[in-house]
Amino acid sequence: MTGRLDNAQPYALGLFRIVIGLLFACHGASSLFGVLGGADGNGGTLDAGTWPGWYAAVIQLVGGTLVALGLGTRAAAFISSGSMAYAYFKVHQPEALWPLQNGGEASAIFCWAMLLLVFTGSGAFGIDRLIAARGERDADKASERTPVAA
């Protein structure tokens, strides 16, 4: 049983990355474009350039999209994780210690989920993997063509 689970790990990680990325991007799209209820639940948007909400929404939209695609996953997840840590400690935590009390559950979960992706990478189904595989194939072809000097 363990062997099957180990073999499925890249696929489970890839699906996890896609879901987390899409959910994160939806938060950004909601705040920036007023979709899915908007920033205020009534279709409202954040004013461009307002600190920190608008910048957080841009990071959510761009970072979430990159994570969902598996493109620059580690860097996008690192920045996204940091923005959620900031959101938790500057916006939510001053209200109360525990996320359940201060409304910071989403910030805390996104922070840790993105931090996990920093260390694991994109898993299966990511553009990062396609680029890496193509680079390895190109390197193998080049080494086959290069004569070995004596």
Image: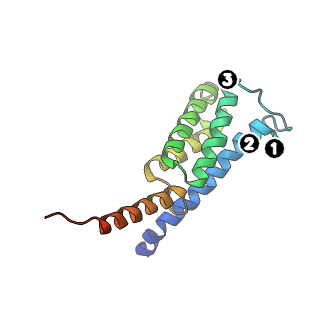
Circle 1 crowding by C-alpha within 10 Å: few under 14, some 14–19, many from 20 = some
Q: CA distance from mark 1 to mark 3?
A: 21 Å
Most distant residue in the right direction: 42
Colouring used for the render: rainbow
Look at label 1 and name its amino acid.
Val
Q: Position of residue 9 (x, y in %)?
A: 47, 65
Which quadrant of the view contains residue 126?
Answer: bottom right
Going by the image, does 140 lie left or right of 6? left
On screen, residue 101 above or below 70 = above
- The residue drawn where x is 61% and y is 53% is 68
Q: Position of residue 144 (x, y in %)?
A: 31, 69
- Which secondary structure lies at badge 1? helix
Is residue 103 visible to us here? no
Q: CA distance from mark 2 to mark 3?
A: 17 Å
Look at label 2 and name its amino acid.
Ala
Which quadrant of the view contains residue 28?
Answer: top right
Mark 2 — residue?
29
On screen, residue 96 above or below 68 = above
Is residue 39 visible to us here? yes
Numbered mark located on residue 51 in the image: 3
Mark 1–mark 2 contact, CB under 8 Å?
A: yes
Upstream in sequence: badge 1 or badge 3: 1
